[in-house]
Amino acid sequence: MVTYGILHEELGRACSSVRTLLTVHDMIAHTILRWGGAGLKERWLPLLAKGEAIGALGISEPNAGSDINAVETVAVADGDEFLLHGQKKWISFGQIADLYLVLCKYNDLPVAFLVERDRPGLSVEPINDMFGTRGSMLALATFKHCRVPKENMIGKPGFGATVAQTALGLGRYSVACGAVGIAQACLDACYEYANSTKRSGAFLKEHQLIQQMISDIITDSVAARLLCRQAGAMRESGDFQDIMHTFIAKYHASTAAMRAADRAVQIHGANGCSPSYPVERLMRDAKIMEIIEGSTQIQQITIANLGFQEFERQKLMAGGDSAGHHASAPERRQVEFDAVTQ
């Protein structure tokens, strides 16, 4: 997980759209690896690992956004198959994906399906002219009587929220690391520009207020990188608090990337608003990081809720409950997971 995070940082440093491709593709592959049946693993994991098939995530909807508890896409049982009805929007790389992980409702229970692109009843429309990550090939997927075999279900009805959170947890971590890459790219661009551009008879790097802005970018970047490393190490070791620390890393890294981009554009002046300089694209891409895989506000709400959950756990661990019971690590992790899904 640490190495995986570093990979996403380096890709994000160059191009957030390429990093997005790896993120959404891996969200599907890791979900199948963890929750898929033997047949699905045998069929899809070799193709996904080789890049012979591209995966994409279908959770967000036109009316529900990314609220997994409010999805409107429904699955209706029809013998050994299901019929899917609804729409999924903002699907990254949905224009070229071969396989979609789709969250639906079945008898008011969340359920997840793998849906092949060539399924009758599935139509895909491109979404173009987006503000940031313009190379991520967004799509709108419409399901009209889309027939899916029962064996394409991941888990059982009622398990869909867990499947979605598994995918989103990996995506949240990779986006956080990619945001660190954006901040670093902003810093690289500022070094280059301030070292070669003169104003008022001196190089920009010699102006104290320019130094102040660059020092802020450096500090933000280092802090975000360390938070991502910590989250990656916790995910790798199975630490039950990895959920909390992944949220923290995503929150800080995405906002740090936006602050870095804002300062980078300011340092570049009018040039920073021109596509001739990289910071214009970096600022557009940084804004996207504050929205995808849970907005900044969702991160704040969740971190606060998990903080209170941790406070209650500490009390329980210190004194136990009325029966003298002390929470085990699996119990504490379940409480934390429940807080996230709520």
Image (cartoon, grey):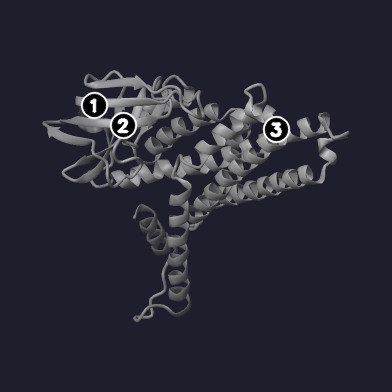
Precedes in sequence: disc 2 or disc 1: 2
Q: Which residue carries the number 1 mark?
A: 143
**Where's residue 18, x and y in %?**
54, 26
Q: Residue at x 82, y 38 (%)?
A: 205
Q: Amino acid at mark 3?
A: Gly
Q: Are marks 2 and 1 in contact (CB under 8 Å)?
A: yes
Q: Are marks 2 and 3 in contact (CB under 8 Å)?
A: no
Precedes in sequence: disc 2 or disc 3: 2
Q: Which residue carries the number 3 mark?
A: 269
Q: Amino acid at mark 2?
A: Lys
Q: Mark 2 to mark 1: distance in Å?
A: 8 Å
**Where's residue 33, x and y in %?**
40, 37
**Where's residue 61, x and y in %?**
31, 36
**Where's residue 329, x and y in %?**
44, 63
Q: Is residue 204 left or right of residue 237?
A: right
Q: Is residue 171 visible?
A: yes
Precedes in sequence: disc 1 or disc 3: 1
For mark 3, give the secondary structure.
Answer: helix
Q: Nearer the viewer, residue 292 or 43?
A: 292
Q: Residue at x 38, y 76 (%)?
A: 325
Q: Mark 1 to mark 3: distance in Å?
A: 47 Å
Q: Residue at x 85, y 35 (%)?
A: 200
Q: Which residue carries the number 2 mark?
A: 88
Q: Quadrant of the C terminus?
A: bottom left
Image quadrant in which you'd find residue 181: top right
For mark 1, give the secondary structure.
Answer: strand
Q: Is residue 43 visible?
A: no
